[in-house]
Amino acid sequence: MSETRDTGRIKTDREIELMGNSSRMVAETLKILGDLLGPGKTTGELDRVAEDFIRSSGGVPSFKGYRGFPASICASVNSEVVHGIPGSRVLENGDIISIDVGVVKDGYHGDGAATFPVGEISGQAMELLETTRDALGAGIGEAVHGNMVRDISAAVQKVIEDRGFSVVTDYTGHGIGKNMHEDPQIPNFVTNGDKSMLASGMALAIEPMVNIGGSEVKTKADGWTVITKDGSLSAHFEHTVVVRDDKAGILTKV
Ligand code: MG
């Protein structure tokens, strides 16, 4: 049967419970940072608050040291897409900042991201944030037993392109569990060869990355920060979810 190859990815109820704990910590961290950030704050300050909160709650920030990444969160401002390194950059009124948080606790990972306005942002920037959040919601809506991964991809892509924005295709969502990145990949666009099936109990990180301008991105000289090639704004929302029969469960919530 075609679905048997997915059996290894199905989590037990106990595993989902543990992933719920780490994922809740991710959501709490994002809430704290969202309340804290504003004009005059540095991205490094946000990183320190996140690391203190995660460690004092009994978790470990899973990004820190991952392939040498130097911080606990990714902080990507304006035209930075993902993997921005927190530091001395001061947030200014009108910026947008994408914050990505990963936590491992009791051996299981949670992963989530959100893009926040800094002070007053433009109408177009607000529309970008709303579109990316809606695309994530549409993708989660397809994360049910018996659907294919490409149903998630198609739903995400449609929301983004219907509103005239571009899908970043160089990075994808992913399965998650004992490892931060597991099979299957969850592209934010339809790829013809993808025949992966979804089954109840699979845990997925769905994470659309959306640009106002073109879809092309490049990596900065720091080796991490991904930016849009044309300098346009970019947004990123992510939830860790569990596939269920009728409706996916969102684990990265407070
Ligand atoms: Mg992720």
Image (tube, rainbow, N blue to C red):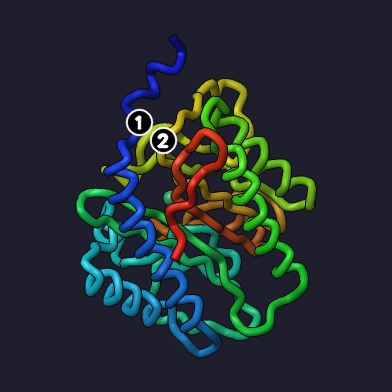
Residue 21: image x %, image y %?
32, 57
Amino acid type of the residue that numbered disc 2 sits on in the rendered structure: Met
Cβ–Cβ under 8 Å for marks 2 and 1? yes
**Tag shown at residue 84:** none
Identify residue for label 1: 9
User: Left of 78 or right of it: where is 37?
Assistant: left
User: Left of 139 or right of it: where is 220?
Assistant: left
36 or 193: nearer the eye? Answer: 36
Q: Quadrant of the C terminus?
A: bottom left
Circle 1 packing at 10 Å, graded few (<14), some (14-19), many (20+), is: many
Numbered disc 1: secondary structure: helix
User: Left of 104 or right of it: where is 249?
Assistant: right
Identify residue for label 2: 202
Seen at 54% across and 21% down, the residue is 195
Seen at 77% across and 72% down, the residue is 123
Circle 2 packing at 10 Å, graded few (<14), some (14-19), many (20+), is: many
Residue 36: image x %, image y %?
46, 83
User: Left of 91 or right of it: where is 117?
Assistant: right
Seen at 37% across and 78% down, the residue is 44
Amino acid type of the residue that numbered disc 1 sits on in the rendered structure: Arg
Numbered disc 2: secondary structure: loop
Is the residue 190 above or below the residue 74 in the image? Answer: above
